[in-house]
Amino acid sequence: MSARQKVGNHLVDRGRNSLFMNEFSSDPGSKMDRRHMLTALGMTMGAASIASTQASLEQPQSSEGRVFRYCLNTSTIRGQKLGIEQEIEIAGKAGYDAMEPWFDGLNGFVEAGGALKDLRKRIEDHGMTIESAIGFAPWIVNDAAKRKAGLEQAKREMDMLAQIGGKRMAAPPAGAQEMTPSNCRLQPKDTEPSLN
């Protein structure tokens, strides 16, 4: 059972744990029941949501101020064999903030006579950065000559990366396929890994 009580110009139901306003104006013809109140509330919330969405769509789509940025790992389009220039165009037109190219694509571009400074400008013209690059220099092999060559390759790749504005590179343990904890030990003399 609920008791009705007049509060100001409003008639209020006081149930067990609820307070429900049956009239929201002094006009006796403007009664509001629970169904109408929930409908009005839903419509108000929907309108606020639409206004908020519209306001966010009107904001510039810059990556500044966002928590997350979008980076294209070019391995996802690697099978199309597009070349680094087309990969940059695709990433830029798709709205990516950054990309992660593979070094073989960069090497192919340079070997074909391309200039890394031109590639950097193209990347910057799309408003992108190079967050990382992927290479497989064999830097952890258990052969001193191969390891030295692998580290030299990694140095050349890091230089290329710096020239296009890159910040870091993925360096998976390429060449470590034959090494296991049971057959790898460090030599005290030169601290080079050795297989038993």
Image (tube, grey):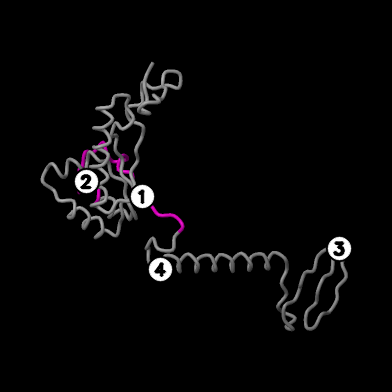
Q: Dot 3 corresponds to which residue? A: 16
Say which of marks 4 and 1 sits in front.
1
Q: Is residue 28 magenta?
A: no
Q: Position of residue 91 (x, y in %)?
A: 29, 51
Depicted 67 relative to depicted 192: above or below:
below
**Dot 2 amino acid type:** Ile
Q: CA distance from mark 1 to mark 2?
A: 15 Å
- Which mark sits nearer the N-terminus, 4 or 3? 3
Start-end of magenta stretch: 67-89
Depicted 118 relative to depicted 173: above or below:
below
Q: Is residue 82 magenta?
A: yes
Quadrant in the picture for the N terminus: bottom right
Say which of marks 4 and 2 sits in front.
2
- Seen from the viewer's position, the closer of residues 66 and 186 is 186
Say what secondary structure mark 2 lies in.
helix
Q: Dot 1 corresponds to which residue? A: 71
- Furthest toward the front, the residue is 189
- Which mark sits nearer the N-terminus, 4 or 1? 4
**Dot 4 amino acid type:** Glu
Q: Dot 2 corresponds to which residue? A: 84
Q: Dot 4 corresponds to which residue? A: 58
Q: CA distance from mark 2 to mark 3?
A: 70 Å
